[in-house]
Each structure stands twice: as structure tokens, then as C-alpha cells.
Image: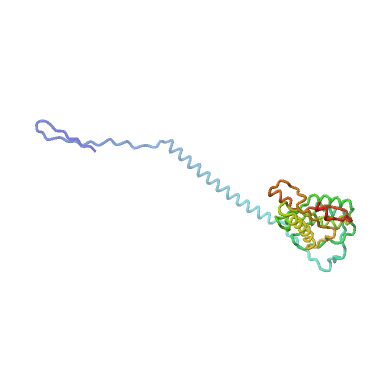
Amino acid sequence: MTRLTMHAQGGLPPQSAAFAPPQPAPRQVPLWAIVGGGFLFLAMFTALVVTTTLLIVQSRDAAQLQAAMALDEPPAPETPIVQAASVPAVATDVEPEVTRTSVDLLGADLAAPERARVVPPVALQERIQAPSCIDYLDTLVKITHVRFPLGSNEPAAADMPRVRNMATALRLCPEVKVVVEGHSDRRGSDKLNMDLSWYRAETVIQILRDEGFETVQMEPLGFGARRPINLSGTISGEGENRRVQFQLVPRDTVVDDRLARN
């Protein structure tokens, strides 16, 4: 509120008056907003009622379906009790018949666990034909390499399964034998490398013997560093040279260690 004072002429006392600022008129809500809000509330309420009803109906239908499935499920068959006397005795002295298909060594994993003692297969009633056995062994010796750490004769465990397969296949093909060739890298003296290559070849054969394999058809031979397969001179290349590899020869072949020194 504002007060205004006016001075009159002629010594008359001053006149004062108070002025109040104009008050704004109250704001009215449009009718369309009221109607629209009512429709919106009604729609939301209707949607809530419909959703709740659908959930109740679905829950009831699911419960009824589970009850019907439980009624239609057939009872579990009873396990028949077999009398011990009705079970025929298993003959333990009958050797299984081995055919060419059953001794498909290329597709079979005959490897035994590392360092586990392996019992050789039972005597075969009918040996497979020699050409198929020789073909298998010839393929196996070409793809089998056993690697060794630097200065060690302990073979890599991952390379031994194929060697075990080779020892098993040799029993099926007595006409041949396998020369186990030991090799070293080009580090160290000639004498040290030659001795280490022999140790590596003999160690592979001894591991097979300790595990129960027949090794009469295996003969060790050390070559030292005279036959490298990687001449790069790198660490990985020399790792490939530290190896044992195999050669298939006739059974009556005389292995002369002078071959390794030439």
C-alpha cells in the first residue's frame, strides 16, 4: 500500500490518501483441462483393472494346467528285481575276437595315462594282415616326434601317446622293428651331444618298458647333433632339433651305431 501526502496552500493542513496496488484477478482453470484430466484418470484406472484381471486369469489357468498334467502323467515303472541265479556267469577265459576293424589303430586312442602301468592287450586269436599293420606303422613313425628340454633326457608328456600306440601296434606286426633315433641340438661338445642323444632314445624305450609294453622290437640309436632338422639357429629351431624320432625297418636289420657317427 502507498500513502500520498499533499500540501494545500493558505496554511491548510496537508491532505493524505492511501493507494493500494491493484490485485490480480483469480486465475480460472479451463474447462477442457478439467475434462481431459478426468478422461486420463479414467483410462489409467481402467487399464489397471484390466491388467490385474488378466494376471489373475493367467495364474489360475497355469495352476489348472499343472494339475491336469500331474493327473495325466503315467506312474514310473517299477525296476524289476533280477535274481542273482538268473544272471549267466561271464566266462573269463574267452579271448575276444579281433578283426581288422576293431584294431583300426589310426582311429583309436590307445595311449595310457602318463607313467601309469599299462597291461598289454590280450593275445590275439587272429592277427591282422601284415601289409595293413606295416602301413599303419610306417605312417605313425613319420609323424611321431618326441621333444626334450635343453640338456635333459625327460621327454615331453604330450608327445608320448603316439609312442605308446606304436608299441602296441608293433605286437601285431612281428616282421618289423622300430629304430628309436635320439638327437640333440648343436650346443655343447660332440661327446656330450652324442651321449645325450643316446640317453634320450634309451629313456623313451625304458618308459614304455616300465609301463608294461613289450620293447623287444625297439632298438635305440644316438646321432648327437649330426642330423638337425632346423638350421635357423634360433631358440625355437634348436628346440626342434632336441628330439627322438623313429624309423621302421625289417626285423632282421642290424643297426650299426657307426651310422650315427658318419
Which residue is rendered at x = 55% and y = 46% of the image?
51
Between 221 and 42, the one lying in front of the other is 221
Which residue is rendered at x = 85% and y = 50% of the image?
135
Query: Is residue 43 positioned above or below 256 on the image?
Result: above
Query: Is residue 51 positioned above or below 95 on the image?
Result: above
Between 136 and 234, the one lying in front of the other is 234
Judged left or right of residue 61, residue 188 is: right
Quarter of the image that includes the N terminus: top left
Judged left or right of residue 24, residue 131 is: right
The residue most toward the top is: 9
Q: Position of residue 168 (x, y in %)?
A: 82, 57
The residue most toward the left is: 11
Query: Is residue 201 positioned above or below 17 on the image?
Result: below
Q: Position of residue 251 (x, y in %)?
A: 88, 56
- Picture quadrant where residue 76 is located: bottom right
Query: Is residue 168 positioned above or below 37 on the image?
Result: below
Q: Position of residue 85 (x, y in %)?
A: 83, 69
The residue most toward the bottom is: 85
